Amino acid sequence: MLGVSGGIAAYKSCELVRELRRRGAVVRVMMTSRATRFVTPTTFAALSEQPVLTDIFPNGQSAAIEHIDWSRWPEMIVLCPATANLLAKLAHGFADDPVSATVRAAKVPIVLCPAMNSAMWEDALVQRNVSLLKENDYRFVDPEFGAFATTTEGEGWGRLARLEWIISEILSALQKQKPLAGKKILVTAGRTEEYLDPVRMITNPSTGRMGFALAEAARALGGQVMLISGPTNLTPPHGVEFVPVVSAADMAHAAIKNYPNTDVLAMSAAVSDYRPRLVAPEKMKKGASTFQMEFERTVDILATLGEQKTRALHIGFAVETENELDNAKDKLRRKKLDLIVLNNPRHSGAGFGVETNRVTLVDRNGQVQELELMSKLAVAFKIFEQAMKLNRGSF
């Protein structure tokens, strides 16, 4: 259930409804009277295809029935945007509008997404209310620094957090069990880029979606997650430590440096196997119709970390276009992996840059599990589910 209060950021809640529904959620919206000044209830009704609650006494009925019924409907409640006024009401037990009354009666996780101008967000009483709510197990996606909706406001702290962060927190709040709590999860994602000269490079089509989904799933399951990623247009999940890199050497350095005390290593990055032996200091000019360039091997990160392996569980990925299962099993053995995730980008729905994947999981015991086509986030949860079965005594 989405609760919307009266701030200009209410317009962003429309996109939040669309994103949640796109991911399979059923969403109802409740609004304060001031929220209806910014977005009409009809808009939310159309986007959610569900009823919208805007009055604590709808159609003159008794509030004792309506807000109690609504409080029992959802698996969780998200308040976006949460204004300073709404935070004050919740912190001090008020229940005088449909949003605060429903929250007051609810017994589900509640995520607050504050949005207001800098002066209001930094106000001592607002911060006291925030602290009080956090002490009482309300979850927050704190606002970020950036430009406000109106030009007179300029920039500052208080801008509504990006929707990707809000969705990450929603996903985490929905997980009743946290089997990765206290575990250090190291995830690599995306492509690497190897420059030939200042303006040209060799790379691959990886967008990082699978690795980012792994990081998001691990964080939702309670893990302490570090995400090392090559260049990508994706927003890192909320609550994840993000380390951006460019080249295979950069990724190797970051992964090896942060590997100690890792409990689960998930290497989904598409790392370049070769790099130019010499990089031209200036842009190479067009010359003969052909030319040759010498390449050298990059560091094999999985193999290197495999040699350092003690208690950590290692998950690798194999992108294969022929002899798929045999090649994956060979990589599993050579790289000392516990689990390998095999996929063929030529298969429908499993290519680079799409939001779905069709994979086969092969574990160290020789068990093979073919998964149906599903979202990359769903695949990520399946991967960790299988990993936890392999290390049942450790998780």
Image: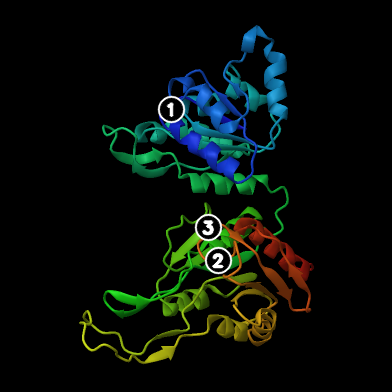
Residue 104 position in % (x across, y down) = 65, 25
Residue 378 image-quadrant placement: bottom right
Answer whether labels 3 and 2 touch (C-beta < 8 Å).
Answer: no
Pointer 2 residue: 351
Please report whichever mark, 3 or 2, sits nearer to the chain's N-terminal start: 3
- Return the x and y of residue 97 as percentages of the image width and height: 57, 18
Crowd class of label 1 (few under 14; some 14 to 19; many from 20; radius 10 Å): many
Q: What residue is at 48 percent from the left and 21 percent from the top?
A: 36
State the CA–CA distance, disc 3 to disc 2. Answer: 26 Å
Name the mark on residue 240.
3
Separation of marks 3 and 1 at Cα, in angstroms: 28 Å
Q: Amino acid at mark 1?
A: Gly
Q: Secondary structure at mark 1?
A: loop
Q: Is residue 296 above or below residue 69?
A: below
Q: Residues within 10 Å of mark 2 (few under 14, many from 20)?
A: some
Image coordinates for residue 46, horizontal then vertical, percent: 55, 28
Amino acid type assigned to the residue bearing label 2 in the image: Gly
241 or 187, nearer to the observer: 187
Q: How many marks?
A: 3
Task: Assign a secondary structure to mark 2.
Answer: loop
Figure coloring:
rainbow
Is 251 located above or below residue 34 in the figure? below
Residue that badge 1 annotates: 7
Q: Is residue 304 above or below residue 208?
A: below
Q: Nearer the viewer, mark 1 or mark 2?
A: 2
Name which of mark 3 and mark 1 comes first in the sequence. 1
